[in-house]
């Protein structure tokens, strides 16, 4: 069975839209902006989505006709709803269709839970409504409500959390559910807001850069966190105009360390090889790799080794788009899949910026026109999960 | 779509159902999990000390199921993950005014840490997926297991784990999620297989958003042939409690404890969520 991606949406530091995010990455260097919505003591570059929660609620009502009952919504839920509302604008109608939803997040509704915890520990009590959306499944439920209101028959919905590979894994789950039949569309998505929990967690691991991150540069010193929400719609219906064909999505476990990849990059290598095998595509056919490329010393080193393990001396052109979007954690798998599909469509490779000094491999540093047929996009996460997706031009 | 249960292990208020099914011995005065001696399966003392209860319980049942058994995929499921470490991390953030870090608490609070731990202890590179769907988690993950077993997987390790803390229990109480008012905790692991030989029971149905009557109507099974298992009086209420129910039903079917009934239904109501898993005697 062939599976196609027929619509995509990105909500990122660039605002709403795949095209906007694509154009910004193509044309601009990132310079750090003052934080508007994120409450943290840390002065580090973060990629905020440029809307307040109130603005998102208003946009949902005014621009997408999604009017929400009055209650407390986590930023995670609002961003989930925003990307799906945007997705549905360019997607085939879901009315009367059997739809599977696979959402992914690492933080869930932590942006509100942490306020609850602060108040609870300070006062011995806090507004219980703040933790009503704590669990990752909360945002998925809100997305399903939007789809049901549009007439969709949501036959199965799920939420995945495998750290930074979460939404890439969600794509694999969505593909599996389409293959088992009797499903028209799978909506696969990922979302993560910026919150104190995540910022302080990553800070405690010492892997946040104080400057704009430099993927694959020899002197890189860490990642920048970013907010993101992204979604794609997958279908097995070949008559629907598609952005790309989905060939494979394979996962392997590194089984080495909770937060670091093994020196010989066993997990990433296995995932990339498994994705090639499943896609029945030889390594030399890959025209471009959208790297996980977080800009931590460990990730980029082991990802380079994995690419050499898989491609030998002929590593294809590759880049990391995280210099612009930041590391959007649970969202990055689908966000970068959407960017990769756009690169296929535009036959253009998006660059990595801030790269000066070669360590092992040199990424594409300038926007390039290219003959792109097959793209591989990688996501690796805490817990050792490595996922690799291969897509094909249509 | 064949999904057979080959083996089970639980950490629960009545111990490990995989080892002992003596239901008469249980006198519940709390629904706290009876924790085993973890040394037997988590040998590294430092690792044991660092791990919270959600991780220890989940790792224990997984390792018990994996003795002499190979699998090609791991599915883990949890509602709150390592909630005790989540609380520790938040505590560090607020008491230090964001000046101190707590890397262990942060790492362990990640929902898929259990899967990562098991992979490391077993040195296995098989894929793992962590499902986080509140009360629907178990039925959701088992449905996906059915799909994978009818596709490219032959044997799957399923593990769910949830711990309770003073704060999490008080919050769940405020949401009134338990019909009985009793909040439990625990871990369940199962080896699921596409192959019937030596199976305890078969999972024939796993669906969210339906009650038991709807499930039986969809399956065309007469209620006379079905035991609706009241498993929560043994494990208490928690989001992943239905996995305990499935393990218990599988073992009871193995020992023909249902008076000739061919099927057992596990209904799970958790707040507004409802799901049903139906097992068939092998």
Image (spheres, rainbow, N blue to C red):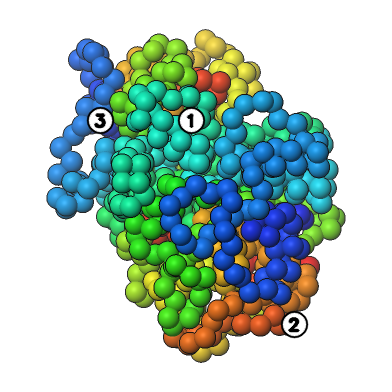
Category of crowding for the residue at label 2, using alpha-carbon neighbours closer than 10 angstroms: few (below 14), some (14–19), many (at least 20): few
Q: Nearer the viewer, mark 2 or mark 1?
A: 1
What residue sits 54% from the left and 12% below the top?
B223
User: Is B47 positioned to the left or the right of B55 in the image?
Assistant: left
Q: Nearer the viewer, residue A21 or B218?
A: A21
Rendered-image quadrant of the N terminus of chain A:
bottom right
Read off the chain for label 3: B
**Circle 1: element type:** helix
Q: Which residue is mark 1?
A: A131
Spatial CA distance of label 1 from label 3 is 33 Å
Total labels drawn: 3
User: Is A61 positioned to the left or the right of B258 in the image?
Assistant: right
The spot of residue A393 in percent (x, y) is 75, 70
Spatial CA distance of label 3 from label 2 is 61 Å
Q: Are marks 2 and 1 on the same chain?
A: yes
Q: Nearer the viewer, residue A27 or B86?
A: A27
Q: Are marks 1 and 3 on the same chain?
A: no
Category of crowding for the residue at label 3, using alpha-carbon neighbours closer than 10 angstroms: few (below 14), some (14–19), many (at least 20): many
Quarter of the figure with residue B32: top left
What residue sits 78% from the left and 70% below the top?
A345
Picture disc at residue B16: 3
Instruction: Work out whether residue B88 can be spotted.
Output: yes
Q: Are marks 2 and 1 in contact (CB under 8 Å)?
A: no
Quarter of the figure with residue A394: bottom right
What residue sits 61% from the left and 82% below the top?
A364
Give the answer, above or below, for where A311 lies relative to A342: below
The spot of residue B186 in percent (x, y) is 32, 30
Q: Which residue is mark 2?
A: A369
Read off the chain for label 1: A
User: Is B251 positioned to the left or the right of B270 in the image?
Assistant: left
Q: Are marks 3 and 2 on the same chain?
A: no
């Amino acid at each position: 069975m062939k599976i196609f991606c027929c619509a995509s949406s990105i909500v990122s530091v660039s605002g709403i839209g795949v095209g906007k995010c694509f154009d910004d990455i193509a044309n601009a260097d990132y310079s750090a902006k003052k934080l508007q919505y994120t409450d943290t003591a840390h002065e580090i570059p973060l990629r905020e989505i440029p809307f307040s929660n109130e603005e998102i609620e208003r946009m949902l009502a005014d621009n997408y006709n999604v009017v929400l009952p009055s209650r407390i919504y986590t930023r995670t839920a609002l961003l989930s709803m925003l990307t799906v509302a945007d997705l549905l604008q360019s997607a085939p109608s879901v009315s009367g269709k059997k739809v599977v939803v696979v959402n992914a997040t690492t933080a869930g509704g932590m942006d509100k839970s942490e306020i609850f915890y602060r108040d609870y520990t300070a006062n011995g009590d806090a507004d219980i409504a703040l933790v009503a959306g704590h669990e990752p499944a909360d945002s998925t439920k809100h997305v399903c409500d939007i789809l049901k209101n549009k007439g969709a028959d949501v036959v199965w919905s799920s939420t995945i959390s495998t750290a930074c590979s979460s939404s890439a894994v969600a794509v694999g789950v969505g593909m599996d559910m389409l293959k088992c039949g009797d499903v028209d569309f799978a909506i696969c998505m990922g979302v993560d807001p910026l919150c104190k929990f995540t910022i302080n967690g990553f800070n405690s691991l010492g892997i946040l850069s104080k400057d704009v991150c430099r993927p694959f540069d020899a002197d890189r010193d860490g990642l920048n966190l970013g907010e993101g929400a992204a979604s794609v719609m997958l279908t097995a219906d070949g008559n629907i105009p598609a952005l790309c064909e989905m060939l494979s999505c394979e996962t392997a476990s590194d089984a080495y360390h909770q937060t670091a990849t093994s020196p010989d990059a066993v997990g990433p290598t296995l995932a990339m090889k498994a994705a090639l095998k499943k896609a029945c595509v030889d390594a030399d056919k890959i025209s471009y790799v959208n790297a996980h490329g977080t800009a931590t010393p460990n990730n980029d080193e082991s990802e380079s080794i994995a690419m050499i393990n898989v491609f030998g001396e002929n590593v294809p052109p590759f880049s990391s788009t995280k210099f612009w979007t930041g590391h959007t954690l649970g969202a990055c798998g689908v966000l970068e899949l959407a960017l990769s599909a756009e690169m296929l469509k535009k036959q253009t490779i998006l660059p990595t910026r801030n790269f000066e000094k070669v360590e092992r491999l040199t990424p594409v540093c300038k926007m390039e026109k290219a003959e792109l047929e097959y793209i591989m996009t990688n996501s690796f996460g805490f817990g050792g999960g490595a996922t690799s997706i291969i897509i094909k031009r249509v | 779509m064949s999904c057979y249960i080959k083996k089970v292990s639980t950490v629960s208020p009545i111990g490990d159902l995989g080892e002992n099914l003596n239901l008469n011995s249980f006198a519940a005065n709390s629904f706290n999990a009876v924790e085993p001696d973890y040394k037997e399966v988590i040998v590294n003392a430092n690792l044991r000390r660092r791990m919270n209860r959600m991780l220890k319980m989940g790792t224990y049942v997984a390792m018990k199921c994996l003795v002499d058994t190979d699998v090609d995929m791991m599915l883990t499921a949890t509602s709150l993950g390592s909630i005790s470490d989540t609380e520790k991390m938040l505590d560090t953030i607020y008491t230090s005014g964001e000046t101190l870090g707590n890397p262990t608490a942060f790492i362990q609070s990640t929902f898929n840490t259990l899967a990562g731990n098991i992979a490391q202890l077993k040195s296995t590179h098989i894929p793992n997926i962590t499902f986080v769907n509140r009360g629907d988690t178990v039925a959701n993950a088992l449905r996906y297991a059915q799909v994978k077993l009818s596709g490219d997987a032959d044997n799957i390790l399923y593990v769910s784990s949830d711990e309770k803390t003073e704060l999490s229990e008080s919050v769940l109480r405020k949401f009134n999620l338990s019909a009985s008012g009793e909040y439990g905790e625990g871990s369940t692991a199962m080896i699921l297989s596409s192959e019937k030989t030596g199976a305890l029971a078969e999972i024939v149905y796993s669906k969210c958003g339906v009650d038991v009557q709807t499930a039986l109507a969809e399956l065309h099974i007469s209620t006379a042939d079905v035991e609706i298992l009241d498993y929560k009086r043994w494990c208490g209420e928690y989001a992943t409690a239905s996995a305990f129910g499935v393990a218990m039903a599988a073992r009871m079917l193995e020992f023909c404890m249902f008076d000739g009934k061919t099927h057992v239904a596990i209904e799970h109501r958790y707040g507004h969520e409802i799901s049903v898993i139906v097992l068939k005697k092998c």
